[in-house]
Amino acid sequence: MTTRGIDYDRLTLKDAFDLAILVEEEARDRYEELAAQLTLHHTPAAAGFFTKMTGIEEKHRQQLQVEREKKFGSEPRSIQVELLYDIEAPGYDEVRAFMSLGDALRTALASEVKAHAFFTEAVRNVKDPDAKALFSELCEEELEHQALVKAELAKLDPTPNGNPNDYSDDPVAL
Amino acid sequence: MNAPAFQAKDFKSDLKPIWCPGCGDFGVLQGLYRALAAIGRPPHEIAFISGIGCSSRIPGYTTAYGFNSVHGRSLPIAQGVKLANPDLLVVVAGGDGDGFSIGGGHVAHAIRRNTDLTYLVMDNQVYGLTKGQLSPTAPRGLQTVTSPLGSLEEPINPLLYVLAYGAGFVAQATPADMPGMTALIEEAIRYPGFSFVNIQSPCVTFGEDDQQLKAHKAKMKTLASLGHDSANQLKAMDLARAYGTELYTGVFYRNPNPPPTYDALIRLRQAEQSKKAVPRNRILDAYLQK
Ligand SMILES: Cc1ncc(C[n+]2csc(CCOP(=O)(O)OP(=O)(O)O)c2C)c(N)n1
Ligand code: SF4
Ligand SMILES: [Mg+2]
């Protein structure tokens, strides 16, 4: 997780919305990519779960977008966070062909934990009280998401089903 | 503030990468999209040239012009592309095998000509696409399918190699530090002349455990944190000697006074010569007079 380029001293409520929207957008796009990778590499259960996560992150993004529009209409974004990486999105190295559904859930859980750490840090650093309140709300939401993923994990058979590093599904040489 | 002209997604093609899930090249590609968005040139003004290998598939995953060419021949083709259309931004992408084994002979010439292009090598110390053979950057002793008892060869040091031939911009990056890598790719593309970035991009399928991103995160050190002055070429060479033992990231060397590029010199020569051009029907006379 990296957040170079965020100036918390000057961050307004609109910036806080935009930041949160970008975080959800990145997570949505990453889950979509990971689902595509795992579909291609014959790992349907994990791919299916990541597709579900794509939908969930998109829903969060839309909710934030609606709130932002209510308050700020179509005012343009003024934050520059091109270097914001992997806040709520799992890193590319977190997945493997033939990973189990349990591993996919644990990957998502780790990402929700990362996101919670990010928003906690944001609450601590931001000066604007409205932006602080929004970040606190998002912190709470991240905890709820963690609980949801943990509940899904609890439903799974705890028997480990092999190490995906023992198998590979590498590209075919041309 | 004006909205940026392009976003990372504008450079992403509809083709889905077939790389193994977890491959380092995914991060490199994402960093590349963002670097291109920051550069702000439209996809049709950019050309990606590659050889053959997993990493060489990059042109197909961008919306820019692309040529996934022949194993080891990306640099000659890229130089031709740049000379034919100097207005194109030319980026060359490929693997350690493509660049320093079969294509190794071309690197020196691209550097000494100083053609304005950016060469990104995804160094995973292995031949990924052909299933794990020994690559020229693999460490001595490495056991692979082609060195089952351990390699008896010293690896090539790509950083020292390009520095020795006088490359004007030499950097190393890893997708374990995405913002750092993205910024380096952008800086390399902006450098006026031949620029080289060795990207340590792990192969999760055939690579070693100590070459994976988690290991990179633990061992990487930025050259900035060492107080390195990137204008100091000799110091850059000294630091580059640690390739294979230390993982230094950042700019090793940046020529503070970039010399004219080959493509610019060719343009000048074309302009000079075109003044002396004779009409077609008098070409023969020009020779007969001699
Ligand atoms: C002339 C020729 N020789 C050999 C090959 C087989 N070949 C394809 S890719 C490759 C090596 C790939 O390794 P590298 O360049 O490091 O790329 P990676 O797959 O690791 O990204 C080889 C030997 C070929 N395609 N053409
Ligand atoms: S074989 Fe290695 S380099 Fe090729 S796609 Fe798989 S992980 Fe990446
Ligand atoms: Mg390789």
Image: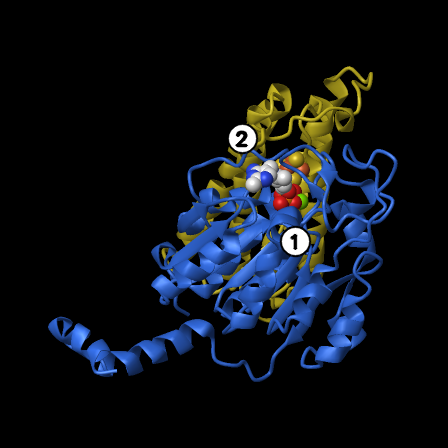
Q: What kind of residue is marked 1?
A: Phe
Q: Is disc 1 placed on a helix, strand or loop?
A: helix
Q: Determine if residue A133 is in view.
A: no
* Count of number-bearing discs: 2
Residue A144 is situated, as x and y percent measured from the top left of the image, at 67, 36
Chain that bears disc 1: B
In the rendered view, does B14 fall on the left or right side of B282?
right
Q: Quadrant of the C terminus of chain A?
A: top right
Q: Nearer the viewer, residue B77 or B85?
A: B77
**Display colour for chain A:** yellow
| Disc nearest the viewer among 2 and 1 | 1
The crowd level at tag 2 (other Cα within 10 Å; few <14, some 14-19, many 20+) is many
Q: Which mark is residue B100?
A: 1
Residue B272 is situated, as x and y percent measured from the top left of the image, at 30, 83
Q: Residue at x 69, y 67 (%)?
A: B250
Q: Is disc 2 placed on a helix, strand or loop?
A: helix
Q: Nearer the viewer, residue B164 or A111?
A: B164
Label 2 to label 1, Cα distance in Å? 32 Å
Q: Determine if residue B1 is in view.
A: yes
Q: Which mark is residue A36?
A: 2
Note the chain letter of the blue one: B
A54 versus B193 height, above or below: above
Q: Residue at x 70, y 29 (%)?
A: A105
Residue furthest to the left in view is B281
Q: Quadrant of ligand 3?
A: top right
Q: Residue at x 62, y 66 (%)?
A: A8
